[in-house]
Image (tube, rainbow, N blue to C red):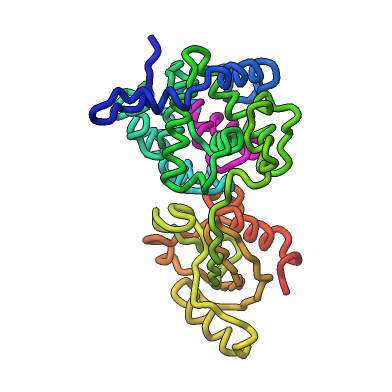
Amino acid sequence: MKQVVGACSAPAGGTGKSVAAGLADPGFSEAVIRWQKQHGRHALPWQNTRDAYRIWLSEIMLQQTQVAAVIPYYQRFLNRFPDVRSLAAAPSEDVMSHWSGLGYYTRARNLHRCAQRVVEQYNGAFPSDPGLLAELPGIGRSTAAAISAFAYGTRAAILDGNVKRVFCRVFGVEGYPGAKPVEDLLWKRAVALLPQDGVESYTQGLMDLGATLCTRSRPACERCPLADRCVARATGRTHLLPERKPKKAVPEKSTTMMIVADADHVLLEQRPDSGIWGGLLTLPEISVLEPADLASGEIEAALYTAAEPYGIFDTYERLQPFTHVFTHFKLHVLPYQVCLTKRNAFAGQGNHVWYAIARLADAPLPAPVKKLLLAVFREPDLLSR
């Protein structure tokens, strides 16, 4: 028997039917299902399965990440962690290494914790109830509904970014969809539009519409099965809906990273679980050194002081600065390579580790740091200045 999830509770003194009745539109779901069966995506690696583990993994990876970018990571991840028990038992460093480059690393930490909870609390079987799924690390209401719908056929409403865009355009919903009043309205709409049958095709169809036709820019309205009922198209506002988040100035931060190395090893430090690049290995950082404001002797003295605990200082070289753009700020990085004639063994304790240069390609490093290190040790002429 299919579960019914997300029904609106009745307000005091009423039946609660008026809200759902006002938002329901059976023709909407019928059009989506019909289109999905004929034109939707059917051959993605995580489709055509009821394996909740594979579905969950894909849903987490697809959060804020394009399908094309996810596919190779998904396949490599499954090769290393074929089921929830193998993922739960894996060292954190191994999980982060296989996630490295996909971004939003909190997802990877929550993924690992979630796998451990499923094994400990549910004996390795994901629950079918979206409410229980949503209590697990890294799984929100929409993700829980998608997992439950695809793995168990549960009648549950999703509302990811693609679906919000479809709803805002088709029904002419104004306001930023991430604002709570607008999001609450969209959730009511999502619940009211759920079909009685075919929830898997409907759910996949909504995702496919948002990803392939009702895109942010240049939507393919002429091929959309909802074009004849779309308010945004009828009023010439597809470029205005959904409304964008009010802009704020993007903060900018700067740091100086040291590549401290001898002939075979480079010094790395592990980030705290919270904050940027949480849980990953990265390079030691020091107070920002601006070459324009410092004499070369001052730069060398600062690097010598910073590197002294790790070994015998030999030479240094300034490398090309680079900028990495995060979701909420820009990070400007000024890297220096510091060569040691001899490294100290005690530096490989605590949150610092001497990492073999030959193994850097497999290290759990943030993508820009890994790119920098591989360039330094494989093609140093590209980065020296």
Q: Residue at x 59, y 53 (%)?
A: 367
Residue at 75 percent of width and 66 percent of height: 381
What quarter of the picture does the N terminus occupy?
top left
Q: Is residue 181 left or right of residue 257?
A: left
- Please provide the residue range marked out in magenta: 55-81
Q: As drawn, is 47 to the left or to the right of 91?
A: right
Predominant secondary structure in magenta? helix
Residue at 54%, 50% in the rendered image: 363
Q: Residue 4: name its quadrant.
A: top left
Residue 384, percent from left and from top: 71, 71
Viewer-closest of 371 and 19 = 19
Q: Is residue 49 left or right of residue 240?
A: left
Residue at the location (70% across, 20% down)? 39
Q: Quadrant of the C terminus?
A: bottom right
Quarter where residue 217 is shown: top right
Q: Is residue 76 visible?
A: no
Q: Give the percent coordinates (x, y) of residue 206.
A: 58, 27
Disc count in the image?
Answer: 0
